[in-house]
Structure formats: C-alpha cells, structure tokens
Image (cartoon, rainbow, N blue to C red):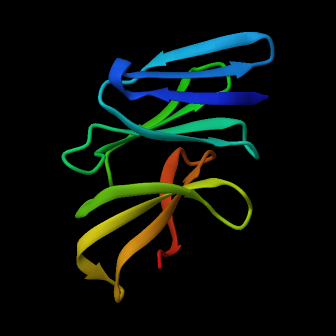
C-alpha cells in the first residue's frame, strides 16, 4: 500500500512508503503528484512551461507504467479524483472541444492510454 507521498520539488524527488520499503523516484522539474489508492498508483505532473507538459504514472514499487504529453491542442492543468476515487488529470484546451475548454482524462490501464471522461467545471 502506498503511504506518505512526499514531493520534494527543489530536489526533483518523489518519495513514498510501500510496505516496509521507501521508494524514491527522480522527477526532473516535478510540479505535483497524487496517490491513487484505489489502483495503488502514483500520478505525477512535471515539466511546467508554465503548466505541466508531462504526466507520468508509477506503480507502488516505483516502476514507470505510463508517460504522456497532453492530448493534442491541450495542456495538463491539475490532478484530482473522480467519483470512483481514482486520480484523473484535468486538461485545458485553447480552442473549445464540444463546448468546453477543460476536460478530465483518466488512464485506462488495459489500453495504456488516456481517455476523455468528461468536462471539467
């Protein structure tokens, strides 16, 4: 189980406990991170220019499972939870998509891809 997530931005370091192990992961230009307790994953946003441009997902052991730039025409905005208590990422588009600038995306482990889950408001 993932516990005690610490983001040490000035050292580009993510740290958490998994069982009796302490996990440390280097994340250049770390912006923010959240634990998805439901799926036992760590989501991290990095490379702010000025908003984050990279999403990385790690398993509880610190192994990188997924890395992505934002969807085309969008920028990553922030991490939050959906109603199922899973971490999702808000993306903002300059040009409205189906009437909205901001959309939530979730990570589909089976397809190893981000999928749009609904408007962010």
Q: Is residue 105 left or right of residue 46?
A: right
Whether residue 97 is visible: yes
Residue closer to the observer: 94 or 114: 94
Extreme residue in the top direction:
21
Q: Quarter holding the N terminus?
A: top right
Q: Quadrant of residue 47?
A: top left
Instruction: Name the spot of residue 92 as percent of width and height, x first.
Output: 32, 67
In depth, the one of 50 and 95 nearer the eye is 50
User: Is residue 71 something that shows in the picture?
Assistant: no
| Residue 111 vs residue 39, the one in the foreground | 39
Residue 11 image offset from top left, x and y in percent: 36, 18
Q: Image quarter for residue 61?
A: top right
Apparent side of residue 50 relative to residue 14 in the rendered image (left or right): left
Left or right: 47, with 16 as reference point:
left
In percent of the image, x 39 and y 24: which residue is there?
Answer: 27
Q: Percent x, y for residue 60?
A: 68, 26
Residue drawn at (72%, 29%) of the image: 2
Residue 105 x %, y %: 49, 61
């Amino acid at each position: 189980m993932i516990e005690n997530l610490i983001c040490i931005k000035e050292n580009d370091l993510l740290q958490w406990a998994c069982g009796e192990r302490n996990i440390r992961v280097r994340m250049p230009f770390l912006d923010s991170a959240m634990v998805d307790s439901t799926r036992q994953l760590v989501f991290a946003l990095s490379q702010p220019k000025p908003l984050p441009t990279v999403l990385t997902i790690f398993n509880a052991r610190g192994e990188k499972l997924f890395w992505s730039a934002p969807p085309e025409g969008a920028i990553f905005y922030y991490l939050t939870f959906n109603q199922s208590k899973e971490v999702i990422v808000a993306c903002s588009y300059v040009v409205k998509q189906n009437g909205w600038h901001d959309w939530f995306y979730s990570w589909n482990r089976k397809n190893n891809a981000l999928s749009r889950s609904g408007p962010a408001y």
